[in-house]
Amino acid sequence: MKHKTGHFKLKKALGLWELSLYGIGIILGAGIYALLGIGAGIAGNAIWLSFIIAAILAAFTGLSYAEMSSMYPKEAAEYNYTKNAFRKPVLSFVIGWLMIIASIVAAVTVAFGFASYFTHIFGGSVTATAAVLVLILSAINYIGIKESSTFNIISTLIETSGLLIVVAVGLFFFSSYGMTIDPFEIPPGAGGTAFGSILAATALIFFAYLGFEDIVNVSEETKNARKIVPKALVIAIVVSTVLYILVSLSAVNIMGWERLSASKAPLTETVSSVIPNSDFIFSLIALFATANTSLILLIVGSRILYGMASDKSMPRMFSVVGNRGTPYFAVAAVTIGAVALSLVGNIKTVAMVTDMTLFIIYAAVNASLIALRYKLPKAKRAFRTPLNIGKFPVLAFLGLVSSLLMLLYFDAAIAMLEAAAIGSGLVLYLIFRRKK
C-alpha cells in the first residue's frame, strides 16, 4: 500500500493468532534450549524457582507494555513510550539504541546456537554457518512480514512440540520413579544465600523470556493493534511460563543439576536418557527453535531502527519502505551489524549483557507508564493494568523496583560492557543532533 506521496507503508498482516505465536515463538526459542544447563549450575535443582521469579518479573513489565501498546501502537515502542512520558530526546534515543543493540547481539548469539546444533549433525564451520543463517533469515525478513509470520508459525509449532516432549518424558519418568531429587537443592559452594543463587540464575535465564517486549514492535503490522497487541502479550507470557516450569521440573528430576550443568545440549540429553536414539530428532527441533528466535530478533531490530528513523531520530533512509512492505534499508543495516558480530561466541556473557540491557529498558518502560498515568490520565487506553491505587499503577511500580534490583546481580565486567553500549548511544545522539 502507498501513501499519497508514493512511498510504501508497512503491511498490516498479523492477527491475534499470528501475533500470539510470534510472541510464543521468540520466548520459547534458544534461551530454554541453551541456558537451562548453565542456570542449573547456579541455582541447582531449584532452577524451576528461577523460572517462576523470571515469569513474575516479566508479567509486571509485560502488563505495562500491554497498556502502553494500546495507547501508542507503533514500531520502536520503547522509544515512543519514553518520548511521550518524559519528553527527553536523549533518554528516548538511548533506550531505542539499546533495544537495537540487544536485538542484534541476541540474534547473533542465537544464530551460534543454531550453528552448534547444525555442525554437530552435519559438520562444517560454526562461524560460517551462523553467518549464512543470518543472511538467509534476513532475506526472509526482507521478503515480507507475512512470509516471516508463516515461517514463525511453523517453527513455533515445532519448537513447542519439542518442549512438550520434554514434559511428557518427565511425566513418564515421574510416574515410574517419582521425585528422584531434592527440588530445592543448591550447588555446594554457590556463595551467598540459597535465595541469592536463585536470583543470580534468574538474572541469567531471564534471557529465556526475551521476546514478550518484541510483540509491541510490530504494532504497525498488526490489525486492530490497540486491542490485539495487549491480548497477544498476555497469552504469550502465560503459555511460555507454564511450559518453562514444567520443562525445568522434568529436566532436573531426570538429570539432576550436576548432569544438566555439564551438558552442552541439556534438553536433548534429558529426552535421550529416557528415549534412546532420539538425539537427531531433538537436535532438528532445536534447529527450528534457534532459527525462529534469530529471525524474530532480526525483524525487531530492523523495525526499531525504522521507527526511530520515521521520527527523524535516525537517518531518514532507514524509514524507507519498499514494495514488499518492509523497511529494506533498515533490514540491510541490521543484517550488516549481525554478520559483523558473527565472531561472538560466549552465549553466557552475551545473554547476561542482553538481560542487563533489558532490565534497564524495562525500568524505563514501567517508569513511563507511571508518568503517563498522571500526565495523560484521560488518554484512550484499550487495556489498563490491574491493581491500581487511584491513578497509581501498583504492578508497574513493582516492575520498576524489581528491574532496578535485578541490576545488582550482574558482575562488574557485564556492567562495563553495558556502560559502553550506553556511551555509544550518547555519542550517536550528539552526532545526529548536530546534523539536524
Image (cartoon, rainbow, N blue to C red):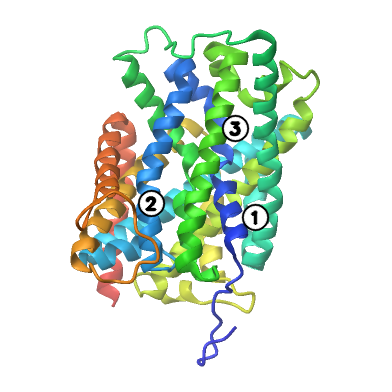
Residue name at image x 51 percent, y 71 percent = 224
| Quadrant of the rendering where the C terminus is positioned | bottom left
Residue 265 visible somewhere in the drawing: no
Which percent across, then down, holds residue 383?
39, 61
Q: Earlier in the sequence, mark 2 or mark 3?
A: 3
Q: Is 10 in front, or is 401?
A: 401
Disc 3 designates what residue?
A: 33
Q: Amino acid at mark 2?
A: Leu
Q: Earlier in the sequence, mark 1 or mark 2?
A: 2
Q: Is 6 in front, or is 72?
A: 72
Which percent across, then down, holds residue 210?
47, 44
Mark 2 element type: helix
Mark 1 element type: helix
Q: Between label 1 and label 2, give the one nearer the viewer.
A: 2
Disc 1 designates what residue?
A: 137
Determine whether 244 is above or below 436 in the image: above
Q: CA distance from mark 1 to mark 2?
A: 30 Å
Q: Amino acid at mark 1?
A: Leu
Determine the image quadrant of residue 267: top right
Residue placed farthest to the right in the image?
A: 277
Disc 2 to disc 3: CB gap under 8 Å: no
| Quadrant of the rendering where the N terminus is positioned | bottom right
Q: Is 201 in front, or is 302?
A: 201
Disc 2 designates what residue?
A: 63
Disc 3 to disc 1: CB gap under 8 Å: no
Q: Amino acid at mark 3?
A: Tyr
Q: Which mark is residue 407?
A: none
Which percent across, then down, holds residue 17?
62, 58
